[in-house]
Amino acid sequence: MPNPYREIFKAKGAKGFAAAGFVARLPIAMAPIGIVAMLSQTYGEYWLAGAVSATFALANAFVAPQVSRLVDRLGQSRIVVPTTVISVIAFVVLIAAANQDWPIWTLFVSALLAAAMPSIPAMVRARWTEIFRDRPEMNTAFAFESAADELVYIAGASLSVGLSVALFPEAGMLASTLFLAFGSTAFILQRSTEPHVRLVDRGSSGSAIRLRPVQIITLALIFIGATFATTEVSTVAITKELGQPSAASLVIGVYALGSFVVGIVIGALNLKVPLQIQLAIAVAIIALTTLPLLVADTVPLLALAVFVSGVAISPTFITAFGLIERRVPEAMLTEGVTWVMTGIGIGMALGSFAAGWVVDAFGAQNGFLVSVAAGTIALAIVLAGQRSLATPDCDTSACDAAAVPAE
């Protein structure tokens, strides 16, 4: 049996844009935690570090879909170049402000401008779609991207913090900025795989978020994202309570490992079950596997429960992005993917806040109640949206019809 991952990389240019895209997306994980590591050391105030990091993360969550909308209208090269330049310059100013002890307002302004950073994962998926549209290799390509996202979050955050602690406070942010600059440059220079700009007709001239499937998937993944953050926050709190704080990184790594392994396996299969049903099954598994977390009162049990709770993450991402590819007009694809990724980011921010409050108020173990609630709500959203998600695959006429704003 041929290796399906080897097959997708036989496509001309695939290795190049996938490698460049991986480097260019590292700042997604490196920048938020890198800002915290940098400012907490240079200014000595965690509230300031957290506030500047949140300013960047939330601003990017709302700006990125608008940038991606322009990408769909004008092409990747015309938009990625100026937005990356703005973001790189803003990050350089932020680093300089931290190093030179500039006024606090310069930190927030530069963080806001850095939010122009484009959504590289969405554009990489758009290139895979251009190559494998309506072919079974699409599932494998999206599985590979989900695995790449997992590696980015595992390696990126650790690298950013490690460099800042081991070298100097700005080291993590400097590396993140260099990855963004060189990775994006290498990505955009590969013009042969850049998707063609589709003409926008009257039916698909609005925002992708007005489409019912995008609304359903984005809303569901807000709550899925909340389960991620809750697991991380609660794990840190529980391991500290058990007197083994250093075990937190190992347990969180196991969480990502479960998702990574299952995602790779799923990508090698050619499942015949409709994608909306696959999504419902994956989210149901996420919801059910949050329950054992409530009784995991030792580090080994916690690691096992966390590993099990992570197995359905990649399948959820794979099917969610697969549905976006099929239910969104070609002229809106990058924006549609970016909205879903934005939902994950918003959910992680809200989940961290909610879990932190619950842990402070009711104890470390009860932080997982947020995961249970979020998983249940996500499942209810996906089940309620099955009919909308089951619309015919996205040919031109179907997409034009689907592009009518949701009532």
Image (spheres, rainbow, N blue to C red):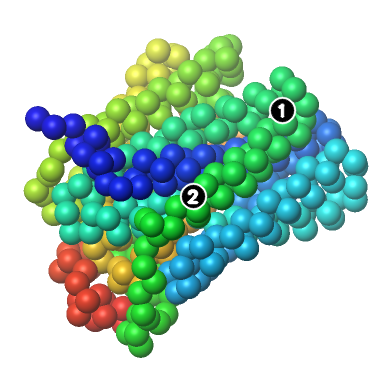
Residue 279 visible within the image: no
Q: Is the residue under label 2 in contact with that under label 1 (CB below 8 Å)?
A: no
Please name the residue shown 77% across and 30% down the image.
Answer: 169
Please name the residue shown 17% across and 66% down the image.
Answer: 393
**Is 284 or 103 nearer to us in this picture?**
103
Image quarter (top left, top right, bottom left or bottom right) of the N terminus: top left
Q: Amino acid at mark 1?
A: Ser
Quadrant assignment, res 193:
bottom left
**Is 367 or 257 nearer to us in this picture?**
257
Looking at the image, residue 224 lies above or below residue 328: above
Place of residue 2 in the rendered image (x, y in percent of width and height, measured from the top left):
13, 32
- Name the mark on residue 187: 2
Place of residue 299 in the rendered image (x, y in percent of width and height, measured from the top left):
45, 14
Quadrant assignment, res 243:
top right
Gap between marks 1 and 2 measured at Cα: 27 Å
Question: How many numbered dots are placed on residues in this image?
Answer: 2
- Name the mark on residue 164: 1
Please name the residue shown 72% across and 20% down the image.
Answer: 166
